[in-house]
Image (cartoon, rainbow, N blue to C red):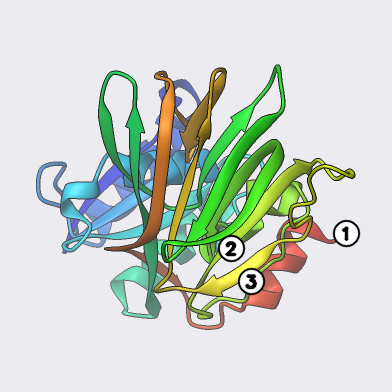
């Protein structure tokens, strides 16, 4: 087994990386930053997302193990106080591998077309004026939408930005996509859906409209180009996460969101 580390703020994680390195040496586990089998993410959920974006070309070959050194750590089962336990569980095969599908997006912009992959969500939003667009599901028109924006999230991403704007939390293993409006406008002229819409995972979602000041973002990455249309569907890419054998969806919710 070969291990590499991923962190964003090295000044906050150097001590943790050194601690992990020493324990790996004791366990005679190799550190290999070029061809790892497991990438240990040290940080919070933002670090996890960035680690996946930086390793999209090797998702078939690696698993991710999280050590929470950030604020929330929803994706992680271990904290910095449990490093020895985490590495012992890894070395002794006491972890389970769970796979989660990513989102695939095609964003046609004025200057370029962007093919993107997202763990959590793909969002289009407008800050200065109402976003007006048409929404299609499998090429069938659903609605004319007006509001601050729209989010398409994966099951894994249902607890992220989607949750913050009133979207539904989806249990692990439910194969679906979720379309959630951000501050929808309802009046005598227009009345789009104001509730999250949970769809089968094989759907194709297209958003078209007049996007004079709108922007598209995905997993904390911003596309700095004016969008013309967005198409989102389930990706063939999957991220593999190593979790405790007793990991539970309810336990993660309680740990992260409930006091």
Q: Is residue 179 above or below residue 249?
A: above
Quarter placement of the N terminus: bottom left
Tell which circle, 3 or 1, labels the residue nearer the N-terminal end. 3
Query: Residue at (44%, 46%) from the top-left corner?
Result: 48
| Label placed on residue 170 | 3
Query: Residue at (28%, 34%) from the top-left corner?
Result: 114
Left or right of 56 in this view: 158:
right
Q: Is residue 255 above or below residue 57?
A: below
Mark 2 burial class by Cα count in 10 Å: few <14, some 14-19, many 20+: many
Q: Secondary structure at mark 2?
A: strand
Could one spot residue 72 in this view of the protein?
no
| Label placed on residue 169 | none
Quarter placement of the C terminus: bottom right
| Label placed on residue 259 | 1
- Residue 25's x, y, as percent? 23, 52
Return the residue at label 2: 178
User: In terms of image quadrants, where is residue 124?
Assistant: top right
Q: Nearer the viewer, residue 163 or 33?
A: 163
- Residue 222's x, y, as percent? 45, 26
For the residues labelled 2 and 1, say whether their Cβ atoms are less than 8 Å apart: no
User: In terms of image quadrants, where is residue 171?
Assistant: bottom right
For the residues labelled 2 and 3, say whether their Cβ atoms are less than 8 Å apart: yes
Tell which circle, 2 or 3, labels the residue nearer the N-terminal end. 3
Q: Secondary structure at mark 1?
A: loop
Using the numbered discs, state the Cα–Cα distance from disc 2 to disc 1 in whole angstroms: 26 Å
* Mark whose residue sits in front, 2 or 3: 2
Mark 3 burial class by Cα count in 10 Å: few <14, some 14-19, many 20+: many
Query: Residue at (42%, 62%) from the top-left corner?
Result: 139
**Residue found at the far front of this picture:** 189
Q: Nearer the viewer, residue 32 or 82?
A: 32
């Amino acid at each position: 087994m070969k291990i590499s580390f991923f962190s964003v703020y090295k000044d906050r994680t150097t001590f943790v990386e050194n601690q992990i390195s020493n324990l790996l040496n004791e366990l005679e586990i190799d550190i290999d930053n070029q061809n790892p089998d497991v990438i240990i993410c040290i940080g919070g959920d933002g670090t996890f997302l960035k680690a996946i974006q930086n390793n999209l070309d090797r998702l078939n070959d690696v698993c991710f193990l999280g050590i929470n050194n950030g604020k929330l750590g929803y994706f992680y089962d271990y904290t910095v106080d449990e490093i020895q336990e985490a590495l012992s569980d890894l070395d002794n095969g006491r972890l389970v591998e769970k796979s989660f599908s990513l989102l695939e997006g095609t964003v046609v912009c004025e200057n370029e077309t962007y093919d993107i992959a997202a763990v959590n969500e793909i969002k289009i939003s407008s800050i200065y004026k109402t976003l007006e667009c048409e929404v299609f599901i499998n090429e069938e028109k659903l609605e004319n939408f007006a509001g601050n924006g729209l989010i398409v999230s994966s099951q894994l991403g249902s607890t992220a930005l989607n949750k913050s704007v009133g979207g539904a939390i989806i249990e692990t293993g439910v194969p679906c996509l979720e379309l959630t409006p951000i501050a929808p406008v309802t009046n005598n002229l227009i009345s789009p859906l104001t509730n999250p819409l949970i769809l089968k995972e094989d759907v194709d979602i297209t958003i078209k409209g007049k996007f004079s000041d709108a922007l598209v973002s995905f997993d904390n990455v911003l596309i700095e180009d004016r969008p013309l249309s967005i198409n989102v569907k389930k990706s063939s890419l999957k991220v593999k996460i190593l979790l405790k054998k007793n990991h539970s969806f309810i336990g993660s919710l309680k740990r992260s969101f409930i006091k």
